[in-house]
Amino acid sequence: MRLAFILLLLVARSFAGETNSPSLFKLADVLPSGRCETEIMAIRFSDRANELMLKLQAAMTTNRDWFFEQVKKAKPGEPLEYDPKLGLTKDEYAEFLLESQNRHLASAGARMSCVFHTDGDILTLDNGDTNSPLGKIRLNTKTGELFASAGKIGMPTWGSGDDPKMPIGAYESCSWMYEKTDSNLYNVRIVKLDIYRLKPSGKILWRFDDSEMIDKKSKQQFEVLFQYSLNDSKADAASDATKPGLSDTNKTTSATGSNR
């Protein structure tokens, strides 16, 4: 379980490139109102990348302490230097680094019904699960300030990308990141939210991580990736308006996410 947290630290900023750009869109313009049927998404790797990843993960488990030391010494944004303890040959490791760049966004084959509540400028989410970290989100759609289960997360960073090799393609984004770790990586706290506007499709993609490890033991590890079309969400809202007696509470179903 600790290995999964360290891997999360390594990939937390690798989903798409980030820049410190001015605001690229208004938050209110990418958020639905009321119930929204979202599509659960996943980042897929090639079969070859998955094959090499299994060998890499097995070696990391065997050489756990050595691996943690390498992670602590690694430069931000750069892969670990090759070592036979990674469980791959030098050529295989080079192949893995190349293949891992060929990630792509794909449907996970599931949907999640979520209610987007707005009280003044504050947005909250209700996915029908009172224990879900999604329900702890408090987003000020006017100022951009975010609160979540870790408390105040802060203000967003804006970014964009046009590289088709990125897993999500061309995008504009708004991102929040809270990360707290100790020098030994025994205690880790991560809360990260990305809201992407995908340029080719116009769909809105959310990626939310909320994970915590205390004294090398996992307390919580949650990640969900979902997207929606604003046109579809407006149609859902119009449909609900014609159904008397429906409240936000009984319109919500259980969330489908990634609890590990």
Image (cartoon, helix red, strand yellow):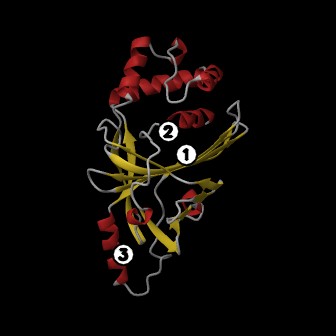
Which residue appears farthest toward the right when viewing the image?
A: 215
Instruction: Compute the Cα span from label 3 to label 1.
Output: 32 Å
The spot of residue 107 in percent (x, y) is: 33, 49
Reading the image, the residue beneath label 2 is 13
First-in-chain label (3 vs 1): 3
Q: Residue at x 65, y 22 (%)?
A: 65
Q: Nearer the viewer, residue 76 or 60?
A: 76
Q: Secondary structure at mark 2?
A: loop
Reading the image, the residue beneath label 1 is 260
Which residue appears farthest toward the left when viewing the image?
A: 200
Q: Residues within 10 Å of mark 3 (few under 14, many from 20)?
A: some
Q: Amino acid at mark 1?
A: Arg
Q: Nearer the viewer, residue 209 or 243?
A: 209
First-in-chain label (2 vs 1): 2
User: Residue 90 occupies which quadrant of the picture?
Assistant: top left
Which residue appears farthest toward the bottom when viewing the image?
A: 244
Q: What label sits on residue 245 in the rendered view? A: none
Instruction: Compute the Cα span from label 3 to label 2.
Output: 34 Å
Image quadrant containing the C terminus: top right
Instruction: Compute the Cα span from label 2 to label 1.
Output: 20 Å
Q: Amino acid at mark 2?
A: Arg
Reading the image, the residue beneath label 3 is 237
| Residue 208 visible to the viewer | no
